Structure formats: C-alpha cells, structure tokens
Image (tube, rainbow, N blue to C red):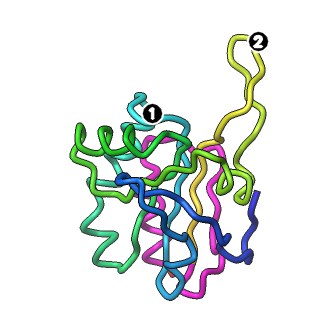
C-alpha cells in the first residue's frame, strides 16, 4: 500500500461515460481518492452518500473526491444517478490503480479466500504527494474524518 510521502500514481481510469482520464491530472490541487469494493452495495452506497453530503465542504476546501472501484463505467453511471451522487466515480476495471495503490488484497468470506479491494482512502496534497492513508476503512463517520484532515492541509 502507498505510504505517506509517495507520489500519486500515474494511472488512467474511466469516468462514468467511459472516457479515459489520468489521475495525476489533478496534480496542482489537493485530492481525496477512495477505493470501494462494489457499487450499489450497502457499505459502498453509504460511503458515497456520506462524501456527497459533504461535497460542498470539500469543494469549499478546493479538494475533489474520486471514488474508484473495478465496476464498469455503465454500472457507475447508474449507481451515481440512482443515489444522486456528486463525487467523481471512476472505473479501474483492469485493476491498474488497485495495484498501484496496493489495495488489491486477499480477503476471506465464510472461509472462502478471494482477491478484492480493501476499502481505503488516500489524501494527496497539491504537489501530488500522499499526506494520509486510511486503510481498512469503517464507513460511519469516515467522510467527516477525511474532511477534517483536508482542512488541516
């Protein structure tokens, strides 16, 4: 997993329209990047809604919020529209960002082992350097905690 002081990885993602964009395009402004396992599941929905509820506060701080999963762009678009999400959602279907951030890990459910996204959040400063990492995120109160760290930058 990326550590404090690491540079933002130069990975390309797809937006909800299926258009490519480079994550390091945001260099020059602080940035919050969060990874979530699967769109339209309870925890992921609550997390996206919590970030959306604080969208005006993040915008006032000048910090975009990007949520990344391995879902297809069409699924992310439907997810965003269904819940009126204002965070930027991005698809990492090939898993390049997941690998670069180090959040593609072995998980276990009912004794079955599989590979999946570890819910994690990363805060980068305007120079594209990682300032804080939240691994193994618990959703409740997380968006507000990240906002406090953003304000402390």
Q: Residue at x 27, y 50 (%)?
A: 85
Q: Residue at x 40, y 70 (%)?
A: 64
Q: Nearer the viewer, residue 26 or 34?
A: 26
Q: Residue at x 56, y 69 (%)?
A: 123
Q: Residue 55, how many percent across, how many down?
A: 29, 62
**Residue 134's quadrant in the figure?**
bottom right
- Classify mark 1: residues with Cα within 10 Å, few (<14), some (14-19) or many (20+): some
Q: Nearer the viewer, residue 18 or 41?
A: 18
Quarter of the N terminus within the rendering: bottom right
- According to the picture, the residue beneath numbered tag 2 turns out to be 111
Q: Residue 127, how many percent across, how many down?
A: 59, 87
Q: Which residues are magenta?
A: 125-152
Residue at the top extreme?
110
Q: Residue at x 40, y 75 (%)?
A: 63
Q: Is residue 121 left or right of residue 151?
A: right
**Residue 12's quadrant in the figure?**
bottom right
- According to the picture, the residue beneath numbered tag 1 turns out to be 43
Query: Magenta segment: does it hold 107?
Result: no
**Residue 19's quadrant in the figure?**
bottom left
Q: Residue 130, how many percent across, how many down?
A: 65, 74
């Amino acid at each position: 997993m990326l550590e404090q002081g690491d540079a933002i990885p130069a990975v390309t993602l797809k937006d909800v329209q299926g258009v490519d964009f480079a994550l390091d395009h945001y260099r020059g402004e602080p940035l919050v990047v969060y990874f979530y396992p699967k769109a339209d599941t309870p925890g992921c929905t609550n997390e996206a809604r919590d970030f959306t509820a604080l969208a005006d506060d993040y915008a006032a701080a000048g910090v975009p919020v990007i949520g990344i999963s391995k879902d297809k762009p069409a699924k992310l678009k439907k997810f965003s529209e269904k819940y009126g999400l204002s965070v930027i959602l991005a698809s990492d279907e090939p898993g390049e960002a997941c690998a670069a951030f180090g959040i593609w890990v072995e998980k276990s459910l009912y004794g079955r082992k599989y590979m999946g996204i570890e819910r994690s959040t990363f805060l980068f400063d305007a120079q594209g350097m990682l300032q804080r990492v939240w691994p193994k995120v618990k959703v409740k109160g997380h968006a507000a905690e990240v906002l406090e760290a953003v304000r402390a930058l």
